[in-house]
Amino acid sequence: MAADSNSTELHRRIGIRLVGLARRWRQALDSRLAHSGLSDATWAPLVHLHELGGGVSQRELASAVGLDGSSLVRLLDILVDQGLVERRAHEVDRRIKRVHLTPAGRRSVSTIRKRLVAIEDELLADLDEDEARVLLSAFEKIEARIAESA
């Protein structure tokens, strides 16, 4: 039984540590990417859009980025003004706006991803491959449980 209580105590510490770490991780990325002229709020949608492939709906992109629709619309307005993304009407349902990277947006994502690789290599330098695999496996389990309970 003692092992169960220790496990429970460890579990209780994970949530608060994960929240704090996620915040510091985003701050570290944001501060290191700031010289590219993009804040976390604007570069993250670009990277997610690239990962999802072009032509996703604003709703799908908002879900992937973890923002509500109105917040994403404001960010997309900025990215459209910067010439990095464009909105196109859905082929069938013109109420749906599909979001696409422009050629400038694709170049920007390429630059961002190169910087992200360097930053992530720096921040994860103390983890070996096995530790990274275990961490990713744990994240997948947590994400699956969250999705299941949603």
Image: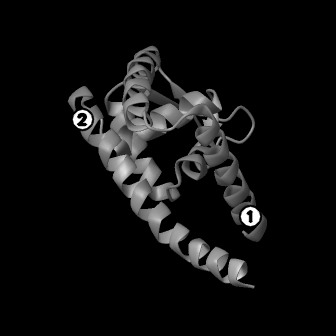
- As displayed, is residue 32 above or below residue 143? above
Q: Nearest the camera: 1 or 45? A: 1
Q: Based on the displayed image, in which of its 4 quarters is residue 50 positioned?
A: top right
Position of residue 74 measured from the top left corner of the image (x, y, whole percent): 38, 49
Which quadrant of the rendered structure holds the N terminus?
bottom right
Circle 1 SS class: helix
Which quadrant of the rendered structure holds the C terminus?
bottom right
Q: Residue furthest front?
A: 2
Number of on-image labels: 2
Residue sitting at 44 percent across and 40 percent down? 44
Residue sitting at 59 percent across and 39 percent down? 132
Q: Which residue is mark 2?
A: 34
Q: CA distance from mark 2 to mark 1?
A: 34 Å
Q: Which residue is mark 1?
A: 145
Query: Mark 1: which amino acid?
Result: Arg
Position of residue 92 measured from the top left corner of the image (x, y, whole percent): 75, 36
Residue sitting at 38 percent across and 48 percent down? 25
Q: Earlier in the sequence, mark 2 or mark 1?
A: 2
Q: Based on the displayed image, in which of its 4 quarters is residue 121 positioned?
A: top left
